[in-house]
Amino acid sequence: MNDRFDFAFDFDLDELAPADATSEEAMERFWSGDLVALSQHHTMPNGSHSFVVAHDQSATWGVPGAPQVMAIAVARDLTRFTYTLETSHHATVSFAQAWLVERGCPPEKITKIRDGLIKPADDLTVWVERQIRESGTRYEVLDNHTSDSDPCETWTLTRDSLAAAAPIRVFHEEWDHNAGTYTMREGAFVGVGAARSWLDDRNSPLPEPPEYSDDNGAVVRARVARIALARSAGAFAAPKADLDALRTPSVGPAQRPVQGRLM
């Protein structure tokens, strides 16, 4: 399937009508010419559902900081010849994947990203992304920001409904195009104001969640260790590191040449 997909061709909606006003409006707004598919899953054998994560290139020319990752969910009722269409923008691929998983996409089917893109730098990045992808309704997204110039990064400000302490979580994604890798780190704050102050100033390390160092720290280490084992077996093509090295947060985004965020 071509990376640049034609909406009617790939989603096969020519003989179907929108099932509701929301889907009809979404179809009227939809423009596939600016989308590059990053990951997709289509159910078989009848093709009743399609799930796609795409890079929306038009966002780079829109409102500064706007999210550039689009999640698309299509459900077809082949007995009534109708379909529903939902779309949602996100700062990171992992949050787009989580949105699709909530709509019925198996996590393992939307995890693989097409070849030729930047890779996770370490095991902790893979673990944090998996935690987001399989989080369900755990994280309430409060705000996000995308920078595809210097510094090249995204952040997503959330409220963690399962956190016993410091429930405001910042997921900070930082890109190193020279190395062809990116990192994702989770920071914890007691309130939204404290999180926004850190995002504005970056004058201290990103504070790690308390569960990284309390009794649950062993659980985190075990899960990251399993990821390291899978990567050493060839499941992932990125370097390994232990959790103590991975968890050291960066003081702030590193300076790097201006480049496009995803490509």
Image (spheres, rainbow, N blue to C red):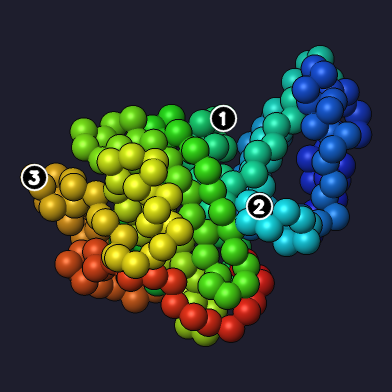
Q: Is residue 77 above or below residue 142?
A: above
Left or right? Give the position of 70 relative to 252: right
- How far is the residue under mark 3 from the one under mark 2? 38 Å
Tell me: residue 79, above or below residue 163.
above
- For residue 103, the mark is 1
Q: Residue at 64% of width from left, 77% of height from top?
A: 259
With 133 as the anchor, is 84 left or right in this view?
A: right
Name which of mark 1 and mark 2 comes first in the sequence.
Answer: 2
Q: Earlier in the sequence, mark 3 or mark 2?
A: 2
Q: Secondary structure at mark 2?
A: loop
Is residue 5 rendered to the left or right of residue 169? right
Proximity of marks 1 and 2: CB atoms separated by less than 8 Å? no
Q: 202 or 215: which is nearer to us?
A: 202
Which quadrant would residue 169 be assigned to in this image?
Answer: top left
Q: How many discs mark residues in the rendered view?
A: 3
Give the residue displayed 83% in from the left and 41% down from the top. 30
Q: CA distance from mark 1 to mark 2?
A: 23 Å
> Can residue 263 be seen in this snapshot?
yes
Residue ID for mark 2? 66
Camera-nearest label, 3 or 2: 2
Residue 213, how many percent across, how many down? 13, 52
Residue under label 3: 215
Mark 1 against mark 3, which lies toward the viewer?
Answer: 3
User: In the structure shown, which secondary structural element does the residue marked by tag 1 occupy?
Assistant: loop
Label 1 – label 3 distance at C-alpha: 33 Å
Q: Name the amino acid, label 3.
A: Asp
